[in-house]
Image (cartoon, grey):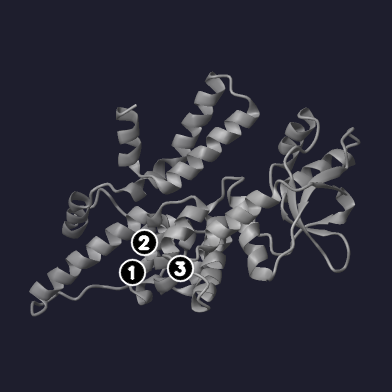
Amino acid sequence: MRNNMFDNLKAVVANTRTNDIKMIDIDELHESDDNFFVVENIEQFAQTILGQGGVKDNLIVRPLETGGYEIISGHRRRAAVQYLLDKGENIVRVLPCLVQNYADEDEKMLDLILMNVSARQISDQELWKCYETLDKILKEKKGKGEYFGRIRDDLAASLGVSASQIGKMQNIDNNAVETVKEAVASGELSISTANEIAKLDKTDQSKITDLSKVQPKDIKKKAVATSNNDKKEVVTSNKEGSEKSDNASFSNEFTDVDTNSNDETAVATSDNFSESDEDITKWESAIKGYALLAAERAGFTTEQTNALLGGMIKVLSVFDKSDAEKKYNNR
């Protein structure tokens, strides 16, 4: 029988949730040093908690040898309650907590990631860190014979993304230069853009001096232009004047694309490059803006608006334009 660690973990979580919940004072709850999920919008979240009369969802914690408890899931809830207490609001300072014990740090990290991913919309920066951590743990467990499934599929299911999104991160992991990986980890570069960069030769990747200005469509155009130039150079290699100047930097070729250029290569690139799912990135801000305007027109509450925007961020990272059109046309 296949030993699926994620099925086992889900079963354990389901069972422990039926146990008694311990009420723990906020001063005994400490943030985890391993938590890489962003704790933000605390003031707004605090008002939601205040309106519902306190924290209703259990925090997940583990006992510390030094005393108190390490938060595995619930950093935002603790921060929101602390904010309300500091403001002098009448809010209960003891929080409902499910106390967990873990066999090792890997088991703790699995819970930390899976519990937080299931409760929030995550950024590309957070998704990349989740991928790196889970991928490392799964490979180690597979090496020990603890796991016999397809890592890619289980990563996708656990993180709530498509298998193709995991494929992009695997491509980055295996083929991107370190500066590109670091840019994803810092939030400077999206996974989609990094995936396109990782398809380039590592020498060409290293020539990109300003990653913050690079867009997937520009990388694809550069790749097509390079291919066309290579073919042109083969035909004209023995002709006088065929040498090409390399004075322009690689990053400028990405960020200063002249769509009105009469250059034969640029025209060919524009004509031959069809719009792909990655090009949707240039419309993301407008799409999110339309969602916010629609929520406002529909009279959504702040919580509903945030949920809608969070959903938009998630689907933009998972589905392409054709998926959206098909969904609309088949409604």
> Residue at position x 82%, y 44% from top?
95
> Residue 328 occupies which quadrant of the picture?
top left
* Residue 170 picture location, percent across and down: 42, 66
Q: Please name the residue shown 54% across and 59% down the image.
A: 6
Q: Residues within 10 Å of mark 3 (few under 14, many from 20)?
A: some
Which amino acid, mark 2? Glu
Comes first in the chain, label 3 or label 2: 2
In the image, residue 270 above or below residue 323: below
Along the line of sight, the residue nearer the viewer: 322 or 275: 322
Q: CA distance from mark 3 to mark 2?
A: 16 Å
Residue farthest front in this picture: 1
One can see residue 213 in this view: no
Whether residues under marks 1 and 3 lie with C-beta atoms below 8 angstroms apart, the answer is no
* Nearer mark to the viewer, of 1 and 3: 1
Locate the C terminus by quadrant: top left
SS of the residue under disc 3: loop
Q: Check if mark 2's residue and mark 1's residue have beta carbons within 8 Å.
A: yes
Query: Which percent across, then down, holds residue 103?
Result: 69, 69
Residue shown at 48% from the left, 59% from the top? 155
- How far across and how far down the image is residue 21, in percent? 79, 46
Q: Which residue is mark 3?
A: 209
Q: Report which residue position mark 2 lands on.
A: 196
Q: Name the residue type under label 1.
A: Leu
Q: Residues within 10 Å of mark 2 (few under 14, many from 20)?
A: many
Q: CA distance from mark 2 to mark 1?
A: 7 Å
Residue 174 placement, left or right of 263? right
Given the image, on which type of amino acid does mark 3 rest? Thr
Residue receiving disc 1: 200
- Circle 1 crowding by C-alpha within 10 Å: few under 14, some 14–19, many from 20: some
